[in-house]
Image (cartoon, rainbow, N blue to C red):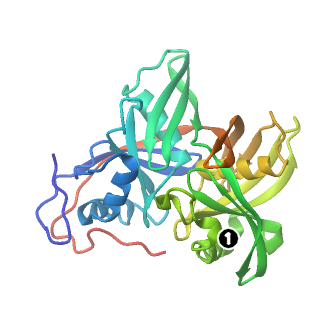
Amino acid sequence: MASTPTASDTAEWEGVTTVDYHTGGEPFRIVADPSVALPGDGVADRRVRAAADPDVQHLRRVLCHEPRGHADMYGGFITPPDDDGAHFGVLFWHKDGFSTACGHGTIALGTWAVESGLVQAPADGVVDVRIDVPSGRVTARVHVAQGRVSHTDFVNVPSHAIARDVEVATSRGPLRVDVGFGGAIYAQLDARTAALAVVPEQVDDLIALGREIKWALNDHAVAQHPTDTRLSGVYGTTIYDDLGTTDDGRAHQRNVTVFADGEVDRSPCGSGTCARVAVLDAHGDLPDGRDLVHDSLVGSRFLARVEERTVVDGHEAVVVSVSGTAHRTGEHRFVVDPADSLTPGFVLR
């Protein structure tokens, strides 16, 4: 197994191989053989240990930071599953650390698992790829037509609304947000209330406001998970435009999700979409059987729907599926020159 350089180890690095996908424009770098130990009692525990392990953090930075990545890079280390009920596990990562959930990554992973032959699929039909993630077990429902993946549904852990009309002090004055859980906790803001629109020309203002709201609420009572502190904290801010309904009567919104510390999701955000559906459903804004058409800042689209109702930890919750497409963008073998003084990399934002 290849060794990875650390801050105290300048030995020549033998390299790490990745397969890269994008889901709705958002990158996902798959590392099937991370080449570092990822011990733990299940994926959730592996995440906690990885965050404290300098070797794992070093590898994450090498693959995520410039010059091999960028400030908005995303990816995952494949791990063993928690038990035989799943095909594999994954630790999701980004420039700031390790996340608890990732819907666009799950769509990419399901597509990769079928296209790589890791999970066998019919030439025409559907196969479930079960994946253990830090927030629980999720499913990538992969649809295949004539031997090719046509699209993949991300079936998430149960999602629920947390709070409505939470006031937040911002540089644009006091604003009110809803808060929901979709594997991670998201604040949700109507862009109009901040005199903004979800358009690329306003991305800098959207990032700044998304960061403000996240950090203002991160230690708030609404951001505390009732049973698992590892899931506490606001992971992202979903800023949305309400576009009314589509011609066929489906709810239609466009959003940008600013997650971690100022990262921008190019896709409509899978786990954020689940949290949005949970809030809309709880408020009666998404009647049974009505889909949410969720567009992104770059024009990509997810279709989301409530598949099941349940109760988790005393909360009324919904199981949401999010449908999208993922496409392979490349295969890489990343290396590090031991004389490279910029290892493990840098970010400018």
Q: Position of residue 324 (x, y in %)?
A: 61, 38
Quadrant the N terminus occupies: top left
- Residue 112 occupies which quadrant of the picture? top left
Residue 5 seen from this side: yes
Residue 337 to residue 182: above or below: below
Q: Position of residue 22 (x, y in %)?
A: 51, 46
Residue 321 to residue 135: above or below: above
Residue that sits furthest to the front in the current view: 314
Q: Position of residue 3 (x, y in %)?
A: 15, 54
Q: Amino acid at mark 1?
A: Leu
Q: At 32% from the left edge and 48% from the top edge, which residue is drawn?
A: 41
Q: Position of residue 215 (x, y in %)?
A: 58, 75
Residue wearing tag 1: 206
In this picture, residue 162 sits left or right of residue 252: left
Q: At 78% from the left edge and 66% from the top edge, which residue is drawn?
A: 191
Residue 44 to residue 214: above or below: above
Q: Number of numbered discs present?
A: 1
Characterize the local packing of mark 1: few (<14), some (14-19) or many (20 or more) Cα atoms within 10 angstroms.
many
Question: Helix, strand, or loop for circle 1?
Answer: helix
210, 89: nearer the viewer? 89
Q: At 23% from the left edge and 56% from the top edge, which residue is drawn?
A: 335
Residue 55 to residue 305: above or below: below
